[in-house]
Amino acid sequence: MTIEFNKEWCLNMARLEGDAEIGAGALAIDPVFDGELIEQPEPEEPALAFGRFVRLMRRGRGMDMEKLADTADIDIVELMNIEEDPRFRPEVRTVYQLSMFFELPRESLLQIAGLTKPKDERMYEEAVRFAARAEAVEALTPEERAALEAFVAVLSEKK
């Protein structure tokens, strides 16, 4: 006896289960996730706070971007976009991996990443307040200065 799991069978089962979406990766339904995904990215302060939050958490642990990307099993280009581009919308999987790495509730990180609607007005207000305070003016560390000078040297090379 063979059982065939074709597309029609899967769609019928999804309807029986409550007409849930089926898929893989970012499109898959997480049985624990109860948030409402935002279809279009809305550049809001909580999303800006997410990038600054990730940067400070990474730096607080003494990690560079490459080390965090490797350790948390996320794409380094996406991590760079998260930290540098306030309009960037990360993948749900990436936020999930970061929540596991930082040991924080994924629902909260999904909200400040701008992927779900904020459920708590206080969280929204704190995200705005955090984003405003998180960008401190500070001198470059010797490592940052060396990296910057090396990069400027490459940019300045004549071809």
Image (cartoon, rainbow, N blue to C red):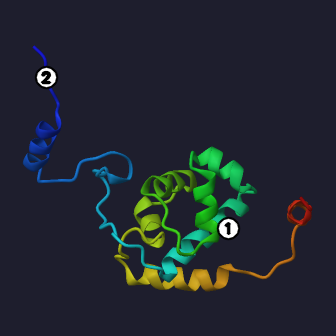
When the figure is inspected, residue 57 is found, relative to residue 21, above or below; the finding is below
Q: Closer to the camera: disc 2 or disc 1? A: 2
* Residue 48 horizontal/vertical position (percent): 55, 77
Q: Secondary structure at mark 2?
A: loop
Q: Nearer the viewer, residue 122 or 1?
A: 1
Which residue is rendered at x = 51% and y = 82% of the image? 45
Identify which residue is drawn at 91% across, 61% down: 157
State which quadrant residue 133 falls in: bottom right
Rendered image quadrant of residue 3? top left
Residue position marked by numbered label 2 in the rendering: 3
Image quadrant in which the C terminus is located: bottom right
95 relative position to 60: left or right: left
Q: Nearer the viewer, residue 63 or 44?
A: 44
| Residue located farthest toward the top when viewing the structure as drawn | 1
Query: Quick check: 134 left or right of 100?
Result: right
Is 94 left, or right, of 40 in this rendering?
A: right
Name the residue tied to disc 1: 56
Amino acid at the residue labelled 2: Ile
Q: Farthest residue toward the front?
A: 159
| Lower sequence index among marks 2 and 1 | 2
**Separation of residues labelled 2 and 1 (CA atoms):** 51 Å
- Tag 1: residue type? Leu
Residue, x 67% and y 67% (percent of image)? 56
Position of residue 91 in the picture relative to residue 37 (left or right): right
Q: Position of residue 81 (x, y in %)?
A: 60, 64
Label 1: which secondary element: helix
What percent of the width, then of the height, locates residue 104?
A: 50, 59
